[in-house]
């Protein structure tokens, strides 16, 4: 503690990706050991991040929420031969859901606030603008923000509560709010600290390039 504030370090990964997950978890644990925050929301597609974190913290001190895509959402990814194939996130599989429950991790599934409702020939510019602005920091930053909003909308976080949010390569400290109140001047969400993030948006930028060529969209960052 220094006069007028707190000095903390930020770790920067060289690039985006799931290869940063273990270090992200370690950095979050290190942060929790030096703070009074007792809730962590983890954006995940397969449960690996929250399960890894659960093995490294005391469940009586830290409550972990695995925020994920809506139940049995489908995504198109590029298969081994280059052909697009359809998959669902692991968090919709019974065995993964059971493992999370056994580890004391609360699974939170709901509509992601920056997802569009699919109406052919239309586009929700407002949601896209928010999503793309957050992705200027990195793809994981957007996922962390969505994780906090979804968990608060579902009643697992109190509005105004300070929490840690993480993805595979990004971790931050935020003040929770409901999605509809995200930008409210007094009740809205705040990003108070960044624990770690990638320096370069390697995955996000490549996805934009692929989309401009009409190629198959990959699963939302590696989470």
Image (spheres, rainbow, N blue to C red):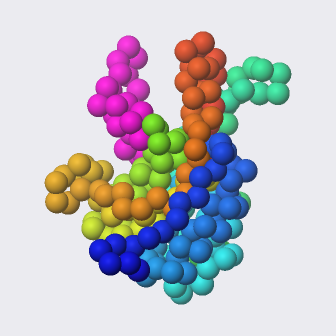
Give the residue displayed 53% in from the left and 73% down from the top. 31
Quadrant occupied by the N terminus: bottom left
Residue furthest to the right in view is 81
Residue toward you, 203 or 214: 203
Residue furthest to the bottom in view is 60
Residue 177 part of the magenta-drawn span: no
Q: State left or right for residue 201 relative to residue 3.
A: right
Residue 124 part of the magenta-drawn span: yes
Residue furthest to the front in view is 3
**x and y percent of residue 207 in the render?**
59, 27
Give the residue displayed 39% in from the left and 36% down from the top. 133
**x and y percent of residue 208 in the render?**
55, 24
Asked if residue 92 can be seen in this view, the reply is no
Give the residue displayed 38% in from the left and 78% down from the top. 2
How many numbered tags mark residues here? 0
Image vertical order of residue 78 relative to residue 32, above or below: above
Asked if residue 124 can be seen in this view, the reply is yes
Image vertical order of residue 203 relative to residue 199, above or below: above
Q: State left or right for residue 40 relative to residue 160.
A: right
Q: State left or right for residue 81 relative to residue 189.
A: right
Q: State left or right for residue 103 relative to residue 172.
A: right
Q: What's the magenta region?
A: 111-134
């Amino acid at each position: 503690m220094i006069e007028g504030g707190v000095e903390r370090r930020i770790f920067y990964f060289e690039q985006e990706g799931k290869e940063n997950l273990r270090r992200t978890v370690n950095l979050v644990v290190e942060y929790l050991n030096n703070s009074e925050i007792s809730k962590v929301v983890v954006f995940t597609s397969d449960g690996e991040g929250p399960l890894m974190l659960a093995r490294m913290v005391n469940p009586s001190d830290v409550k972990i929420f695995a925020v994920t895509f809506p139940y049995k959402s489908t995504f198109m990814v590029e298969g081994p031969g280059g052909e697009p194939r359809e998959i669902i996130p692991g968090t919709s599989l019974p065995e993964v859901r059971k493992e999370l429950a056994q580890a004391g991790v609360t699974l939170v599934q709901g509509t992601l606030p920056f997802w569009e409702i699919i109406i052919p020939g239309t586009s929700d510019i407002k949601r896209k603008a928010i999503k793309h602005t957050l992705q200027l920091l990195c793809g994981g930053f957007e996922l962390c923000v969505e994780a906090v909003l979804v968990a608060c909308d579902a009643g697992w976080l109190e509005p105004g509560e300070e929490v840690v949010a993480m993805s595979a390569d990004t971790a931050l400290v935020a003040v929770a709010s409901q999605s509809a109140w995200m930008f409210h001047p007094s009740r809205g969400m705040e990003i108070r600290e960044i624990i770690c993030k990638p320096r370069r948006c390697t995955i996000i930028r490549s996805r934009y390039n692929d989309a401009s060529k009409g190629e198959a969209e990959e699963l939302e960052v590696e989470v």
